[in-house]
Image: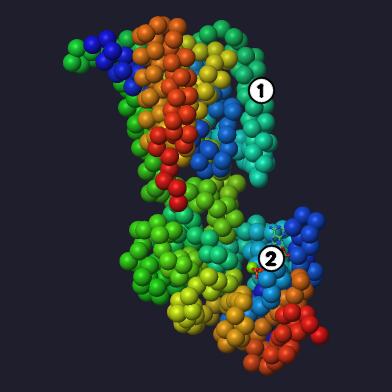
Amino acid sequence: MDWVNAIVQGTLLGGLYALFAAGLSLIFGVMRLVNIAHGDLIVMAAYLGLTVTATVGLHPLAALAIVVPAMALIGYVLQRGLLNQTLGEDLLPPLLVTFGLSVILQNGLLEVYTADPQKMDAGALETASIAMGGLTLGVLPVLTFAIAVAVIWALQWTFYHTAVGRAFRAVSDNQDIAQLMGLNRRHVFGLAMALALGVTAIAGILLGIRTSFDPSIGGGRLIFGFEAVIIGGLGNLWGTLAGGVILGIAQTVGAKIDPGFQILAGHLAFLIILAIRPNGLFPRIAA
Amino acid sequence: MPEPILNIQGLKAFYGDFQALYGVDMYIEPGEVLAIIGANGAGKTTLMRSVTGLLSNGPGQIHFQGNDISQLRADEVAMQGLAMVPEGRQLFPSLTVKENLMIGAQVGRQGPWNLDAVYRLFPILEERKDQASTSLSGGQQQMVAIGRALMANPDLIMFDEISLGLAPIVIKDIYAALPGIINGGMSAIIVEQDIAQALKVSSRVYCLQEGRVSLEGASDKVSREEISRAYFGIE
Ligand SMILES: Nc1ncnc2c1ncn2[C@@H]1O[C@H](COP(=O)(O)OP(=O)(O)OP(=O)(O)O)[C@@H](O)[C@H]1O
Ligand SMILES: [Mg+2]
């Protein structure tokens, strides 16, 4: 039963990792941008949530109504004002610029919020649990997983059933021809980043309710998200969810074997899958 | 002479240090079908890319319906009513046939062309509408590329080598559809390697040679000798 429990808890944890990863996957899929600052943006969203809950007195989940649009707006401005300038044939400039952005964000957060660990108070939600078939499931992890599934589903639906999703795919296929169709790729990229950071806001708030956070933890979240994307296969959002779940299970099972083994087990699972299936488990079917 | 719908004056184009066009002058009147011929590498595609805004130009070199479009972005040029069927078709592989057509309408211009009208022109596309565009034959893909450009309801449509890589019978079908496209008063520029075909469908012809206009004339007046001289540059 203990092992079943570890696997179930890992699956639920995977939902959070999938949320870390979804924005990363989306941005890479649409504009081939690897955003090194992604983890720090997650942490920034958590801090924004903290500020909103502290000043307005909202429940962290209600704060989403403010933080999601705020992060989306930041995403659009960031893309049009800075990141669009770095995109081109060469993959190095966006890497360098987002790396620099990562450093700036970390130091900015440090300046404003100090290095003290913070946590958002979600009241009863944090301790509530439900008993199911001999297992005790935390309501928060279950909710997180459900939100992750809903977000992935919504992104998938947006991609395949809306005009903006069509624009994302067209620009990803061929920027020049998409431009001929009246799509301004700079604007389309801005929208993609807005959507990605909207998802990042959800990830950040759920992270901040689940554990304590400080300005330095962005890098770790980036790695988890990155691993989930690669395990699942680039450009496949359901694969990203599967990747998050595999990573989550590897970590909880690893922790069960030895508590110090948790993070390493996740990285090992990632390396093994990368060695066996370099394109991930569910790569997008090549055209 | 009516005001040209497109007027190109002294157009120069560069790829880095390499100059591909050396001061091209060209015009097309409303409702006219213009042919552009020229050997491989003469600069035909470059000319299309400059006009559509995919290459950047100096100011004042390209006027469309009286407006200077030389320095507009490609999406802004498209919205003014200029569409292109690119060389090699270049459909979006991630989009279905229907989605490829619908994205052509993204510019939001009203007019006779919509999904139904395109399906009437090319009925096979309605049968294949939910398939991936890459699963179609070359000829069918060309139909999608043409339909996609028409969906923008352009005032001027440019075809860059529509017969490239297609079987003769398919080329015949595509050209048979052309009058149905242009009858609505649309102007058209046709870039074509098959000189006889180009002369047959057009009223005037330009020949490009190494980035310069080497011949300009009425399609039924230019002689074979003039063309081969302009085409190959042999005196
Ligand atoms: N992306 C590019 N970078 C550098 N040079 C280019 C590029 N595209 C075209 N050229 C050069 O510009 C010149 C004109 O090319 P262009 O493609 O316009 O010719 P074309 O008349 O369309 O030829 P084709 O009949 O083969 O399509 C050629 O010398 C070509 O090598
Ligand atoms: Mg060409």
Q: What kind of element bears circle 2?
A: helix
Could you tell me the amino acid type at mark 2? Thr
**Any atom of ligand 1 within 8 Å of the CB at mark 2?**
yes
**Residue B161 position in % (x across, y down):** 58, 72
Asked if residue B26 can be seen in this view, the reply is: no
Using the image, tell me which numbered label, if any, was put on residue B148: none
Relative side of A186 to A18, left or right: right
The residue under the point 55% across, 55% down is A178
Asked if residue B37 can be seen in this view, the reply is: yes
Q: Residues within 10 Å of mark 2 (few under 14, many from 20)?
A: many
Pointer 2: what residue? B46
Pointer 1: what residue? A104
* Chain at tag 2: B
The residue under the point 26% across, 15% down is A4
The residue under the point 57% across, 46% down is A187
Q: What kind of element bears circle 1?
A: helix
